[in-house]
Image (cartoon, helix red, strand yellow):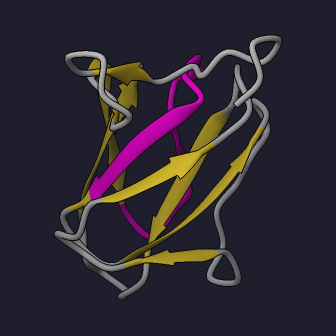
Amino acid sequence: MSKTSPNPCKTVMGGDSNIFYPSVSQRVVITGTSSRSSELSAYALDLTPTVDCFFEIGDVTVVATTLDHFLKGNIRKTIHVKEDTYIAVKNATSGETGSLYISEMI
């Protein structure tokens, strides 16, 4: 990586390993209707749903549908997003409810 483009990841003991640390977290309820997170300011996010769901990334108007990205329940997924974004989520199985846990990583 060039010196004009610093690595935004923290390193441990001067090594080359990129380690992200959780910062802010939030919970979004998963139901049959799209729910949206609060504004997210980190570039890396850990997403962990308690049930199978669909999610979409966007601005304050984002809505999740069954045509969006699928997340398997109880599996953690790390994604890279633009700053100041939102995540919308809805269940994959009718009638099922759960939570999407979002950790902003720095």
Query: Residue 36's image quarter?
Result: top right
Query: Residue 72's image quarter?
Result: bottom left
The residue lying toward the viewer, choosing from 33 and 51, is 51
The residue lying toward the viewer, choosing from 8 and 89, is 8
**Is the stretch drawn in magenta largely helix, strand or loop?**
loop
Q: Is residue 2 above or below residue 30?
A: above
x, y percent for residue 104: 40, 26
57 on left or right of 34:
right
x, y percent for residue 70: 51, 79
Q: Residue at x 67, y 75 (%)?
A: 68
x, y percent for residue 18: 38, 35
Q: Which residues are magenta?
A: 31-48
Q: Residue at x 36, y 51 (%)?
A: 47
Q: Residue at x 58, y 50 (%)?
A: 88
Q: Residue at x 26, y 61 (%)?
A: 76
Say which quadrant the C terminus sits in. Answer: top left
Q: Is residue 57 above or below residue 72?
A: above
